């Protein structure tokens, strides 16, 4: 690994150390409050960052395989939550097959096909395959929830992987961009929780996510903008102003991704999407922010510098 990538990883792990120390201090200063969930979240973030570190520091084939596995686990978890028709076994199989194909386009750096494969070709193919089964009952619902799942768990998340293969970039540029995105998404999640836990009074969307407060949202976004300004010049080709805007974009979109997934879970009638990640629930509970931050940050960056 290049020296700058090593330093960037050290910064990322340094943020985790700061978060771990912060929760330890808060636990001692306010023992009457229950900090168990946040402590579990930070512990899980350690594992998440380790996985992402492996994904960005290994050869391309291994790196994209790790990202594809993440999409597979997310889609699998989604499909265990959403009721599907027994007759849709083959369309579900094709939805899984779309995962390696999508990451193949990334590996070959075929940007055009990467952009249209799932939103266009998978969108058109899956309903056609469902029609061939001949079951009209709940057809529109089944086709809609299946495509929404593929869009969020495969297409949106695959934007993180494409950051590692951007054209005309130094070898360490892609991994540094992933670190920037993951670090800001992570700090935004933790900062919003901390600000909301410490000062939260005004509920933002009480019917969807009762614990989300205006103080947590504003504090988290401002904190994320600050970290973006500090890290932008080291990890990205963004200017100071562009970095601050990227922090704003990630802070707000991370919040939106979180509450959108909360709405999905409330519609289904579950608190967590799974139990894979202690303190977070399932993998979707942790990727909810990235579902929004990854594509928005990717296209913001691509438009400005690629």
Image (cartoon, rainbow, N blue to C red):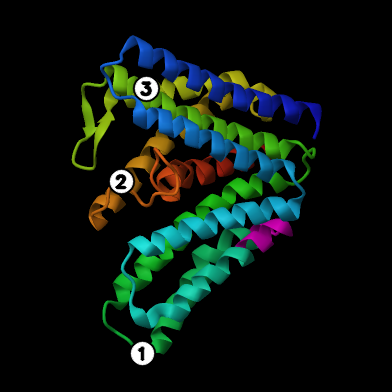
User: Residue 43, position in %: x, y?
Assistant: 49, 32
- Residue 16, image quadrant: top right
Tell me the element at label 3. Answer: helix
SS for dot 2: helix
User: Between residues 169 and 146, which one lies in front from this camera angle?
Assistant: 146
Q: Position of residue 55 (x, y in %)?
A: 66, 45
Figure quadrant of the N terminus:
top right
| Residue highlighted by disc 3 | 194
Badge 1 is on which residue? 134
Q: Is residue 33 magenta?
A: no
Nearest the camera: 263 or 83?
Answer: 83
- Checking the image for residue 188, the label placed there is none
How far apart are the two marked residues, 1 and 3, measured between alpha carbons? 52 Å
Asked if one can make out residue 148 in the rendered structure from this viewpoint, the answer is no
Q: CA distance from mark 2 to mark 1?
A: 34 Å
Q: Give the distance between the C-alpha atoms of the residues marked 3 and 2, in whole angstroms.
A: 19 Å
Q: Nearer the viewer, residue 134 or 210?
A: 210
Cβ atoms at labels 3 and 2 below 8 Å apart = no
From what the image shows, is residue 3 above or below residue 44? above
Instruction: Give the number of the mark in front: 1 or 3.
Output: 3
Report the side of 212 relative to 45 (left or right).
left
The residue under label 2 is 262
Q: Residue at x 21, y 21 (%)?
A: 201
In magenta, the rendered stretch is 102-112
Predominant SS along the magenta part? helix
């Amino acid at each position: 690994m290049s020296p700058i990538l090593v330093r960037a990883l050290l910064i990322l792990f340094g943020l985790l150390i700061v978060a771990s120390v912060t929760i330890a201090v808060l636990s001692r200063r306010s023992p009457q409050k229950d900090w168990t969930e946040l402590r579990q979240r930070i512990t899980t973030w350690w594992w998440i960052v380790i996985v992402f570190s492996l994904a960005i520091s290994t050869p391309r084939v291994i790196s994209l395989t790790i990202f594809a596995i993440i999409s597979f686990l997310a889609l699998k978890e989604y499909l265990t939550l959403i009721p599907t028709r027994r007759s849709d076994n083959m369309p579900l199989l094709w939805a899984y097959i779309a995962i390696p194909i999508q990451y193949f386009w990334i590996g070959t750096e075929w940007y055009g096909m990467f952009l249209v494969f799932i939103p266009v070709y998978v969108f058109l193919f899956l309903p056609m395959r469902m029609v061939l089964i001949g079951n009209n009952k709940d057809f529109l619902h089944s086709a809609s929830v299946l495509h929404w799942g593929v869009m969020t768990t495969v297409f949106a998340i695959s934007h993180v992987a494409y950051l590692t293969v951007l054209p005309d970039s130094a070898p360490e540029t892609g991994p540094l961009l992933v670190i920037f995105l993951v670090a800001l998404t992570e700090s935004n999640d933790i900062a919003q929780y901390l600000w909301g836990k410490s000062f939260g009074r005004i509920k933002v969307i009480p019917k969807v996510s009762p614990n989300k407060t205006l103080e947590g949202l504003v504090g988290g976004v401002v904190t994320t903008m600050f970290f973006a300004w500090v890290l932008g010049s080291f990890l990205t080709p963004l200017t100071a102003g562009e970095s601050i805007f990227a922090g704003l974009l990630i802070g707000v979109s991370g919040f939106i991704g979180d509450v959108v997934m909360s709405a999905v879970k409330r519609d289904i009638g579950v608190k967590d999407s799974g139990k894979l990640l202690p303190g977070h629930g399932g993998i979707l509970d942790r990727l909810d922010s990235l579902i929004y931050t990854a594509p928005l940050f990717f296209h913001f960056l691509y438009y400005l510098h690629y």
